[in-house]
Image (cartoon, coloured by chain):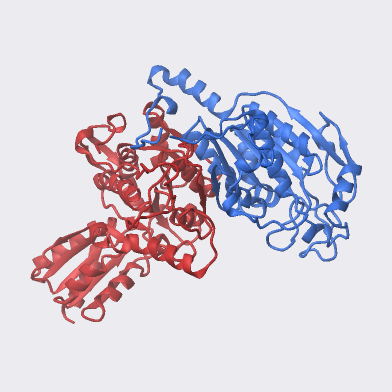
Amino acid sequence: MLNILDNKLDNTPDDTVNPVEQFLRSDRMPHIWCPGCGIGTTVNSFAHALIESKIDLQTLALVSGIGCTGRVAGYVKLDSFHTTHGRAIPFATGLKLANPKLNVVVYSGDGDLSAIGGNHLIHAARRNIDLKVICVNNLIYAMTGGQTAPTTPGHATTSTNPYGTFEPAFNLPHLVEAAGAVYVARWTTFHVRQLARSISEAFQKKGFSFIEVISPCPTLYQRRNKMGDGLDTMKYYKEKSKVKHGAPTSEVGLTLNGEIVVGKFVDRDRPDYQTMMRAQYVETLGERYIDVTDEEPETECVCG
Amino acid sequence: MKADPHGVLTGTHFLDGDHACCEGALAAGARFAAGYPITPSTEVVERFAARVPTVGGTFIQMEDELAASIALQGGVWGGAKAFTVTSGPGFSLMMEHIGYAAMTETPCVFVDVQRGGPSTGQPTLPAQADMMQARWGSHGDYEIIALCPNSPQECFDLTIKAFNFAEEFRVPVMFMMDEVVGHMTEKVVIPPADEIEVTPRKHTKKSVEDYLPYGTNGDMVPEMAHAGDGYKFHITGLTHDERGYPNMTPQVQDKLVRRLQNKIRSAADRICLFEEDRLDDADVVVVSYGITSRVAQRAIDAARSKGLKVGKLRLITAWPFPEKKIAEVAAHVKAFVVPELNLGQMVHEVKRAADGKAKTYAVSHAGGGVHNPDEILNTIVEASRC
């Protein structure tokens, strides 16, 4: 009875149909993002990753926080949750623990994930809970009008630092690697194919995966910092990005106009939260332990 | 439906209120809890952490109460019945997600074992000063249900009730204990599973094509789906239409927020539980709840032995406030006496509902202990003379 979408690109019957459209809530278009914004580009890469990875859409849930990127949850045709500011990761943690069969993606912005949600970010990485986090980093609070974020590079002009920022910014790949993430990559919105590939790779990993996407906010960041329009930003990303797979994350911090180190920085294995939990319970409780997945849910679900 | 026997510890036990609350949650079908330690509530989740791996569920200690109060809602949308447990300072942090649960109609239970406040206050000592916060603590207009047990037995019985209300109305239910009730140890009888009625999740039976996440079809409580069921639904804390899609018009806001209120208000008669005694001939009625109701009982008995016509009205449901009952009683009594472990919270509701038909006397206590029954008795005597 369920309409399971065929997520193979080459099976799309009509080549005039955008292959990404099947993943979107077309009835919610147009979206709210500004011309030149990079978030839509990341969604496009995400959709291609769904095609490439052939992931079962039935078991895929997407959780967002608040902000421009937080609106992604509202536009994807998946079980999708637009939660509160900063709390996408703990919501996703509960979702994954209650139903371990779900593949849970957290899709949110830099302010949401690393400022108000920063505590949750590092603890989820520490636990190695099996979540795929896509962090669209536009270096600013965009939804509220361009205020300084923990990711804003030094000397950038923002609405709350009109004379330039001076506090040091978070280097997010370094932060999440130190906290325990098993997969860490960074791309820009210029690197659409590499980004899609990284997302596909993350789907193959078990554990806390973090993909940072450097993305323009032409309206509030690029304009205020006299960095040109969307096309100028693409040129900047193209010219100043250096692919350095395996680069030490301590060396990938961002500056206002400098080099952007991109690539896959971390790809390692360690047991995820639920694997460790089960092992501990089996060891200490033996046959008394009942795994969540062994029990029928207590609902009168008839939908299968 | 009947309780899942896995979670039911049938028998006669000697339990404190915190542990009894945990057993009530397990009997009600709770299979997920997220918590953060805080006195005097921690024993609830300590017991849950020990018990739940053997009944097919999960406990996770989160990094703070903000995380705990939203992780539990992730658990609900993943298919579990879920709750969290805290005390005043943690309850303050959870307000954000009580609002989210109200807005997204996520059935769940928040247990608050009240202690002295404000701020860090008195971690190991009782108070009842979170009663208004339970009702109004998150921003915006919404309605919740709050229950107040006065014994370990009620901590068991009413926790089941709290989960059942949460499922029936798709609303966050506040379980308002206090430190004394949480830590007092008494006999708790846990019946066989087949004698415990639990309300199942209101899961939709509609087809994917027909399902609207917030469609109500005349019933004020929409049907739920869980992540992974195939419905590809969207949930948001933004004002949303029946599809769950954001909508910023005053019309949709009005329709949604009024429904969130009315689904509880229209059922208030059924939700409002109270215990009454000797109201028939009463001149004065003592209105109390939680541990204070047990102190008040002694004052009521003493007043009766003095020949004063005193009745008892114990609030089991604090919210929605049983204003109809208070109004009825106000019509034929002289006064209400309202002792509580705060400087005046529920007394204002009593006064509002009495609407001038009977006088209202507060017997306030800042917390850190319970009333001396004589304080309540003295006010009863004063009220009898009015």
Rendering quarter of residue A303: top left
Residue B27 image offset from top left, x and y in percent: 30, 37
**Residue at 53% over, 44% down:** A91
Rendering quarter of residue B303: bottom left
Rendering quarter of residue B200: top left
Q: Is residue B292 above or below residue B184?
A: below
Q: Is residue A74 above or below residue B262?
A: above
Task: Out of B97 and A197, give the one closest to the viewer.
Answer: A197
Residue B344 image offset from top left, x and y in percent: 35, 70
Residue B75 image offset from top left, x and y in percent: 46, 40
Residue A66 image offset from top left, x and y in percent: 61, 54
Which image quarter holds the N terminus of chain B? top left
Chain B: drawing colour? red
**Residue at 52% over, 34% down:** A4
Count how many numbered circles sit on residues in the image.
0
Chain with colour blue in the figure: A
Q: Is residue A29 visible from the viewing direction of this image? A: yes
Q: Is residue A106 above or below residue B242?
A: above
Q: Is residue A182 visible from the viewing direction of this image? A: no
